[in-house]
């Protein structure tokens, strides 16, 4: 859902609220990032279905692979927190990933009471196969960029990612405007919702 952009009315018939952020530098870039995020999610949905993976499986596997790359342990509780899942839902996801050969469990050598998760070579191979088309298409665009443009993206993309991460924490803590269903209007500070379409 895009809030405040190209919207002429709300379900209740009231005129849409204007965002307090509309005049800020880069406001239009939020919608470009939203489009990118939405298309990336659609691509991931297409390939995960082809490989028989559930939506949460892909996110959990990504968390395991990222932790493995960084050399830090990752446990079921870490997955539950990152994906905002219950303990039982996390167990189900991990069982599916183990059964499909994407993840193995092993006793953490630093704490024998803990079980760490590790992505298998099968998972890395499947990941490369799944994302090769997107990698090739995106790299073709980046290769057409100047060194300066790539340098800006390299510097700014992690900052934007951290900004979304902080926003997620704020939303989880209840620091997000709520729409009033009865009024049929969007919250006054509404902007685009990354990852939704």
Image: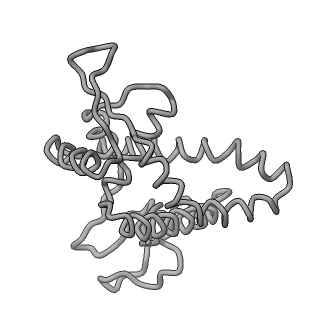
Residue shown at the point (52%, 59%) measured from the top left: 129
Q: As drawn, is 120 to the left or to the right of 29?
A: left
Residue 29 percent coordinates (x, y) = 63, 62
Give whichever of 15, 112 is nearer the camera.
Answer: 112
Residue 107 percent coordinates (x, y) = 27, 22
Residue shown at the point (44%, 67%) measured from the top left: 47
Single out the residue that lies furthest toward the left: 88
Give whichever of 109, 147 is nearer the camera.
Answer: 109
Image: 150 above or below 132: above
Image: 17 above or below 151: below
Image: 77 above or below 51: above
Residue shown at the point (62%, 59%) measured from the top left: 135
- Residue 36 falls in image quadrant: bottom right
Specify the quadrant that holds the N terminus.
bottom left
Specify the quadrant that holds the C terminus.
bottom left
- Residue 186 falls in image quadrant: bottom left
Residue 117 percent coordinates (x, y) = 32, 34
Task: Report the label total.
Answer: 0
- Residue 141 falls in image quadrant: bottom right
Residue 73 percent coordinates (x, y) = 38, 26
Instruction: Give the image's coloring scheme.
Output: one colour
Q: As drawn, is 155 to the left or to the right of 129?
A: right
């Amino acid at each position: 859902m895009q809030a405040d952009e190209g919207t002429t009315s709300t379900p209740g018939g009231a005129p849409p609220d204007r965002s307090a952020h509309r005049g800020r530098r880069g406001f239009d870039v939020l919608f470009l990032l939203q489009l990118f995020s939405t298309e990336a999610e659609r691509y991931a949905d297409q390939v995960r279905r082809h490989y028989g993976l559930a939506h949460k499986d892909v996110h959990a596997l990504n968390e395991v692979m990222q932790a493995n790359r960084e050399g830090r342990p990752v446990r079921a509780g870490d997955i539950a927190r990152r994906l905002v899942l219950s303990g039982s839902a996390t167990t189900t996801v991990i069982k599916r990933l183990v059964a499909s050969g994407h993840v193995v469990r092993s006793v953490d050598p630093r704490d024998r009471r803990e079980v760490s998760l590790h992505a298998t070579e099968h998972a890395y191979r499947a990941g490369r196969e799944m994302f090769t088309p997107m990698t090739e298409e995106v790299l073709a665009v980046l290769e057409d960029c100047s060194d300066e443009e790539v340098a800006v993206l390299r510097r700014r993309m992690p900052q934007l990612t951290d900004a979304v991460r902080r926003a997620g924490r704020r939303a989880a803590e209840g620091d997000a405007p709520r729409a009033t269903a009865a009024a049929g209007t969007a919250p006054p500070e509404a902007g685009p919702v990354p990852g939704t379409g």
